[in-house]
Image: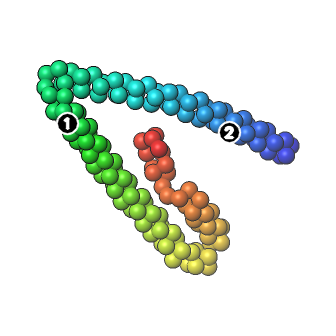
Amino acid sequence: MLDRLATHAAQIASWNAGRLASRTKRNAVLYGLAVLFGVTAYGAAVAASGLWLAERLDPIAALCIVMLVSGAMALAVWAITSAVSAYERRHEAEVRRQSMNAVTAALKVGPVLGNTKPLLLALAGAGLAYLAVSGGSSEEQHGDGQS
């Protein structure tokens, strides 16, 4: 009976993995199309603004204005991306430090527990194994739902 349950669980897991893979492929294609249309719309907007400015100003001045605005936008995006990346690195380092503190504390308490309650020591070992496999806290993995 236990082997049938394990077989059934494996079939469910493979079915879910197949659905996840097909959903990921579909989303990648649809997001790619959305990006393509977005880039096309952005290019058309830049060209239209350049033509509009060229009617009112000298064409060289219009081109310089479009270039400066695009450069400023690129710098703003770069600065925001750098700030977010630095924040994420600091946050990940803090999560690793907290995880290592928990493991160190558990390792220090382990010999004391081993002398008194072997079952408690086994549970602590299982908890340490879970921490090592999960790579941090469950808050980090399920915090805001975005990865």
Dot 1 lies on which element?
A: helix
Residue at the disc numbered 1: 64
> Can residue 116 be seen by looking at this rendering?
no
23 sits left or right of 4 in the view: left
Residue at x-position 46% and y-position 40%: 145
When asked about the image quadrant of residue 57, the answer is top left
Residue at x-position 69% and y-position 36%: 18
Mark 1 / mark 2, whichever is N-terminal? 2
> Mark 1: few, some, or many residues within 10 Å (few <14, many ≥20)?
few
Cα distance between the residues tagged 1 and 2: 51 Å
The kind of residue on which mark 2 rests is Ala
Residue at x-position 24% and y-position 26%: 50
Foreground of the two, 76 or 103? 76
Q: Is residue 111 above or below residue 17?
A: below
Q: Residue furthest left?
A: 57
Foreground of the two, 30 or 86? 30
Residue 20, percent from left and from top? 63, 36
> Can residue 6 be seen by looking at this rendering?
yes
In the rendering, which numbered label is found on residue 17? 2
Q: Is residue 62 above or below residue 5?
A: above
Residue 128, percent from left and from top? 57, 65
Please name the colour scheme applied to the rendered image.
rainbow
102 sits left or right of 3 in the view: left
Q: How many marks?
A: 2
Dot 2 lies on which element?
A: helix
When asked about the image quadrant of residue 59, the answer is top left
Foreground of the two, 133 or 106? 133
Residue 129, percent from left and from top? 61, 63
Q: Is residue 24 above or below residue 89?
A: above
> Mark 2: few, some, or many residues within 10 Å (few <14, many ≥20)?
few
Residue 89, percent from left and from top? 39, 58
